[in-house]
Amino acid sequence: MITIDLSDKVALVTGAAQGIGFATARAFAISGARVLLADVKPEVAEAAKLIVSEGGVAQHICCDVSLSEGCRAMVEKTLSTFGRLDYAFNNAGTGSYYRPVGEVTGDAWDRVINNNLSSVFYCIKHQVPAMLQEGGGVIVNNSSVLGVKALPESSVEYTAAKHGVIGLTRQVAVNHGADGIRCVAVCPGLIDTSLVDPTSDGGIKAGGIPAALRKHFVDRTPLGCAGTPDVIASAVVFLCADQSSFINGSHLVIDGGMSQG
Ligand SMILES: NC(=O)c1ccc[n+]([C@@H]2O[C@H](COP(=O)([O-])OP(=O)(O)OC[C@H]3O[C@@H](n4cnc5c(N)ncnc54)[C@H](O)[C@@H]3O)[C@@H](O)[C@H]2O)c1
């Protein structure tokens, strides 16, 4: 049996108000780490309180990780609150829908690239110097099955952004491995969160996707179902732990087999 003990460690999770980010912040806390939850939504305060009510040590910050300033503030708050930064899960992101490429506006492109790729760059830019203060750390970036594969129903901007996250992960792993920093990615398939909630109106701002599209993704998944946020959370905690000390620059696809078809 593998026992993961992250006592004395400090983790930072972006997009932690809900979904995969919240599940991962909670998993870090259960493993003994102190956690800073970051999200653009004020509900992140409640998310941190819930973890504390379960016996964890957690704090929060409301910030926009698509801006360098938001990421700087987030890392500063981690250091001023907990004194160190060992692990970061750069998870915040937003979805988008397929449109023929000629119909994708520059604004739509910029929004998706900023929220899903530039945000990860800004996170890493501020996290690496903080980790170096303690001699290293682990960065896990949230890509997607669309970071390793293109699917007919997906948008060019989202697929490009998530492929970019894999490239960024690899280069940071190569550039900073010798500094004691490992950098890896996870690539979720369909995971039940508000991002793919068929009960929402399917609008990007509200989150969610049309029920027919969700069913289509389930049908493409050999295991025949969506995953839960906890399956990603467990993988992220494992990738941060010493048990993964030789894993660097890799991406772990967690998709029920969707990408094999
Ligand atoms: N759910 C899936 O099927 C799935 C599949 C593959 C990849 N992903 C990726 O997983 C990540 C988490 O998504 P989720 O499914 O938990 O969705 P979610 O919508 O439930 O959670 C995303 C969180 O990120 C926050 N966020 C978005 N932009 C932000 C910003 N600029 N600054 C700070 N916070 C921001 C949101 O407020 C929200 O709380 C995303 O990067 C998404 O692309 C999800």
Image (cartoon, rainbow, N blue to C red):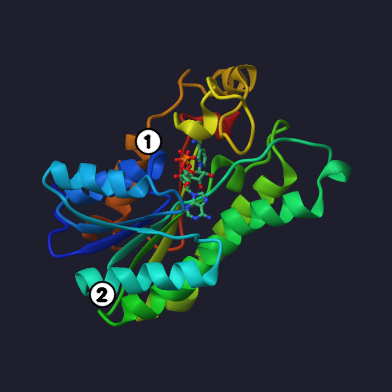
Q: Is residue 152 above or below residue 246?
A: above
Residue found at the far right of this picture: 102
> Looking at the rendering, which quadrant does residue 33 occupy?
bottom left
> How busy is the neighbourhood of tag 1: few (under 14 within 10 Å), some, or many (20 plus)?
many
Coordinates of residue 176 in the picture (x, y in percent)? 43, 77
Any mark on residue 80, and which?
2
Query: Three-letter amino acid code at disc 1?
Result: Pro
The mark closer to the camera, 2 or 1, is 2
Q: Is residue 178 above or below residue 35?
A: below
At mark 1, the secondary structure is helix
The C terminus sits in image quarter: top right
Residue at 44% x, 74% y: name it.
Answer: 126
Position of the N terminus, as image quadrant, is top left
Q: Are marks 2 and 1 in contact (CB under 8 Å)?
A: no
Q: Which residue lies under the disc numbered 1?
A: 229
4 left or right of 250 in image: left
Seen at 44% across and 73% down, the residue is: 72
* Observer-nearest of 84 and 250: 84
| Amino acid on which the number 2 mark rests in the picture | Ser
- Name the residue nearer the viewer: 140 or 60: 60
